[in-house]
Image (cartoon, helix red, strand yellow):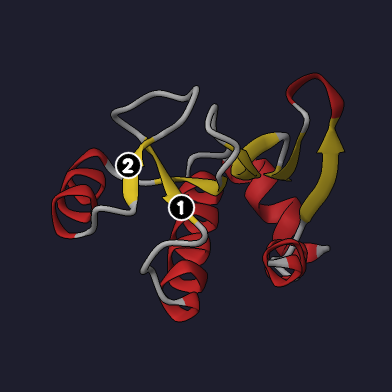
Amino acid sequence: YNWLQEDCAQKKGAIVYFHEPWECIRADIGGKMFAMIGSNKEGEPIITLKSTPADAEILRAAHEDIIPGYYMSKTHWNSIKLYGHISDEMIRTLITQSYELVLSGLTKKVQAEIAGA
């Protein structure tokens, strides 16, 4: 799943780095996280992504490999088990949605700086 980091890094203004305190890969936009790649307490690889509360519930109900965000707000974040039954295309779509959701929550000034970068 090295492509996950590459996919996150290709988003305009994104910074992808190893976050030592959490022992995970973080992807940030404007200083706010939109993706976290790591593992759960069972050691299973996961990616955690932001979602609207309504979409988060729909995704969890439809897919057993999408669970409430591990170590995150269960309302706004979902974790996806990477060795489950979620397609790479769906994960890419959810990464983009998470990025866009976080980007839209940034100030207009920061959004303009990212757009101009």
Q: Residue furthest bottom?
A: 89
**Mark 1 crowdedness (10 Å alpha carbons): few <14, some 14-19, many ≥20:** some
What's the residue type where badge 1 is placed? Lys
Give percent across and percent down for residue 18.
85, 39
Q: Is residue 72 above or below residue 112?
A: above
- Residue 69 placement: quadrant: top left
On residue 81, the disc is 1
Disc 1 on helix, strand or loop? strand
Give percent across and percent down for residue 37.
65, 46
> Along the horizontal axis of the image, is 97 left or right of 59?
right
Give percent across and percent down for residue 63.
23, 58
Is there a contact, CB below 8 Å, between mark 2 and mark 1? yes
Q: Residue under circle 2?
A: 67
What's the residue type where badge 2 is placed? Ile
Residue at figure coordinates x 39%, y 23% from the top left: 73
Give percent across and percent down for residue 59.
23, 55
**Mark 2 crowdedness (10 Å alpha carbons): few <14, some 14-19, many ≥20:** many
Q: Is residue 32 above or below residue 21?
A: below
Sequence-earlier tag: 2 or 1: 2
Instruction: Give the Cα separation between the discs numbered 2 and 1.
Output: 8 Å
Q: Is residue 62 above or below residue 55?
A: below
The front one of 42 and 112 is 42
In which quadrant will I find the N terminus?
A: bottom right
Residue at figure coordinates x 72%, y 72% from the top left: 3
- Residue 24 placement: quadrant: top right
Disc 2 on helix, strand or loop? strand
On residue 96, the disc is none
In which quadrant will I find the C terminus?
A: bottom right
> Along the horizontal axis of the image, is 35 left or right of 49?
right
